[in-house]
Amino acid sequence: MKEAESLFQKLRTVANSYPDMVYSGIVDAAYQEYAEAQTLLTLVQENRFISPEEINVASVAYVLGLADVIGELRRRALDSLRKEHIKTAEECLDHMEEIYIELMSMDEAYMLVPGLRRKSDVARHLIETTRGDITIEARRSSLEKCMQNLEKIVKRKTKA
């Protein structure tokens, strides 16, 4: 992230000299990716959302980057499930839902931010799929523990 911050500082400097570069849209994806990475890192490390002012990106890039964080949180949730860390996966799902609720509350933004409607639709799908994955893993884990307890009981009864 330190390297990315350095590169973005250089980009901002160049953009000050060539503002048409920023307004043409050729750097929009870079700003969105930067906002996404900074937001995810802050969520994971500090359990808080970073503001667009803190990372010095425009609101549109921030909102679109924030929408993309939902996909990264899904990946983190799935990795957590694979490692049997259900609580971490649930925390990811909570953050995903929080972001989605905020995106949905910005009615006017859908008209002003190109691509936000599509990203929100994808986000809704990712959230529902993640919720199902976590539910299945939680139930599977619970069943496994019950079976292990039953196995212990059966062994004790067999020895007696």
Image (cartoon, rainbow, N blue to C red):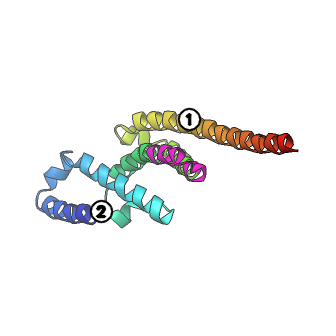
The residue under the point 55% across, 48% down is: 89
Please say if the residues under marks 2 and 1 sit with CB atoms less than 8 Å apart. no
User: Which residue sits at x=35%, y=37%?
Assistant: 115
Q: In this figure, which residue is indicated by the disc labeled 2? A: 1
**Within-10-Å neighbours for mark 1: few <14, some 14–19, many 20+:** few
- What main secondary structure does the magenta stretch of the protein show? helix
- Looking at the image, the residue that sits furthest to the left is 17
Q: In this figure, which residue is indicated by the disc labeled 1?
A: 128
Horizontal and vertical percent position of residue 102: 52, 48
Q: Nearer the viewer, residue 134 or 16?
A: 134
Residue 147 relative to residue 16: left or right: right
**Local SS, label 1:** helix
**Residues in magenta, as a range:** 75-90
Identify residue type, mark 1: Glu
Q: Is residue 42 left or right of residue 91?
A: left
Numbered disc total:
2
Q: Quadrant of the N terminus?
A: bottom left
Indicate the quadrant containing the C terminus: top left, top right, bottom left or bottom right: top right
Tell me the SS state at disc 2.
loop
First-in-chain label (2 vs 1): 2
Q: Real-space Cα distance between discs 2 and 1?
A: 30 Å
- Report if residue 36 lies within the magenta region: no
Is 9 rendered above or below residue 141?
A: below
User: Residue 38: which quarter of the image?
Assistant: bottom left
